[in-house]
Image (tube, rainbow, N blue to C red):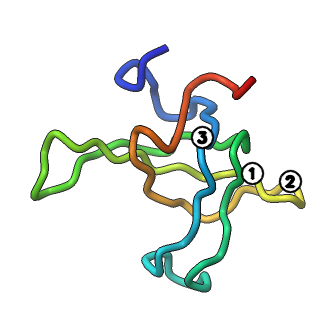
Amino acid sequence: MQHREMQKGDAVYATTTIINDGSVPGCEPGEVFAQPGTMGMLINTGYVELEPDTELFLVSFRMEDGNSGPPVACLADEISPDPLS
């Protein structure tokens, strides 16, 4: 499945370590939201205002306790619709 075919609610997987760059309210800068292979749920899609060709994906990754983490913006190369092998 290509990124453009993904829909809200689809499972996605982190392809890299997802770290808070300081832009997620209520979370410490540097906090790790997902390790490679962590499953998350696609919440929404959008783009960078100054770079309309750069897609953003709002994802909530599963935390170690099984709950959903805070929504974080990811770039296309940071997530995959397919589990890592």
Q: Nearer the viewer, mark 1 or mark 3?
A: 3
68 to the left or right of 2: right
Residue identified by numbered label 2: 66
Disc 1 versus disc 3: distance between alpha carbons? 14 Å
Quarter of the image where one finds residue 73: bottom left
Q: Residue furthest top?
A: 1
Q: Name the residue: 47% across, 75% down.
A: 21
Above-or-below relation of 19 to 17: below
Residue type indicated by callout 3? Thr
The label on residue 12 is none
Measure the alpha-carbon separation of dots 3 and 2.
Answer: 19 Å
Please tell me which residue is depicted at 16% across the width and 39% down the height of the picture: 53
Q: Residues within 10 Å of mark 1 (few under 14, many from 20)?
A: some
- 81 or 65, nearer to the observer: 81
Are the two marked residues, 2 and 1, in contact with CB atoms closer than 8 angstroms?
yes
| Numbered disc 2: secondary structure | loop
Q: Circles 1 and 3: CB distance less than 8 Å?
A: no
Q: Secondary structure at mark 1?
A: strand
Residue type, mark 1 in image: Arg
According to the image, label 3 marks what residue? 15
Rendered view: 6 above or below 33? above
List x then y, in percent, for residue 85. Answer: 75, 23
Which numbered dot is residue 62? 1
Left or right for 45, reference 85: left
SS of the residue under disc 3: loop
